[in-house]
Amino acid sequence: MRKPSDTRLKLLQTALDLFWEKSYGSVSVDDICACCGVNKGSFYYAFKSKSELSIAALEHYWAHSCRPSFDAIFSDQVPPLERLQTYCQTIANSQLAKYQKTGKICGCPFSSLGCELSTQDDPVREKIQEIAARTIKYIAGAVRDAIEENLIKPRVSAGEIAKQVYCYVVGCVMQSRIENNSDSLINLKAGVFRILDTA
């Protein structure tokens, strides 16, 4: 993968932070340029549009933050239920860390942007669906291993259970953002393990 230029990297990181902490619609190209000290000419040299930038920013965040974290959390060297427990704790901790920095529960950047743009921007929606599918695949691996070890009682396929877990986590995080309160995250693990129906 080609290393992004300093200007491109600034735009990627700044855009994600602004979209995440505020919203896509409330942040203009001028806002992004002002925040990272880049002129509009440089912006449009790097990206054709704000939409193209948002897709690249989401992929950059996945590649440089989510994937390395998930590779460690969901390593097959870790017991499957421990993987899922750590996943829940990591999600909660990331929201609390963002809250300490901004004073807001910012939610998941992928689902927040997806909710805002899913009916307006198909390429953004497709990118977010792709990233969601990657996350579900990690969860499904842990669920499959837990089934094989007779740790959970499957009623449906591992893939379907993983999707239920993912949707539950996204819903809790979204509700926390709506309320600007971390209470919905306190019982994240308990809710996930109810879905798993652990033996």
Image (cartoon, rainbow, N blue to C red):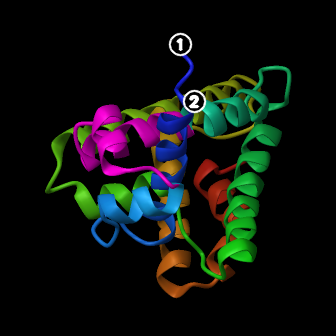
- Residue 43 position, x and y percent, is 34, 43
Q: Is residue 125 left or right of residue 7?
A: left
Residue type beneath disc 1: Met
Q: Are marks 1 and 2 in contact (CB under 8 Å)?
A: yes
From this viewpoint, is residue 186 visible?
Answer: no
| Element under disc 2 | helix
Tell me what residue is drawn at x 14 percent, y 56 percent.
120
- Residue 182 position, x and y percent, is 67, 79
Q: Estimate how packed mark 1 is, as few (under 14), some (14 to 19) or many (20 or more) residues with alpha carbons within 10 Å.
A: few
Name the residue furthest top: 1
Dominant secondary structure, magenta: helix
Tell me what residue is drawn at x 28 percent, y 49 percent.
50
Tell me what residue is drawn at x 46 percent, y 43 percent.
163
The range drawn in magenta is 37-61
Tell me what residue is drawn at x 17 percent, y 43 percent.
122
Q: CA distance from mark 1 to mark 2?
A: 11 Å
- Give the residue pinned by disc 2: 63
Q: Is residue 69 above or below residue 116?
A: above
Please state the total of marks drawn on the protein image.
2
- Give the residue pinned by disc 1: 1
- Residue 193 position, x and y percent, is 68, 55
- Residue 124 position, x and y percent, is 27, 44
| Element under disc 1 | loop
Q: Is residue 109 left or right of residue 184?
A: left
| Residue closer to the observer: 194 or 45 | 45
Residue type beneath disc 2: Ala
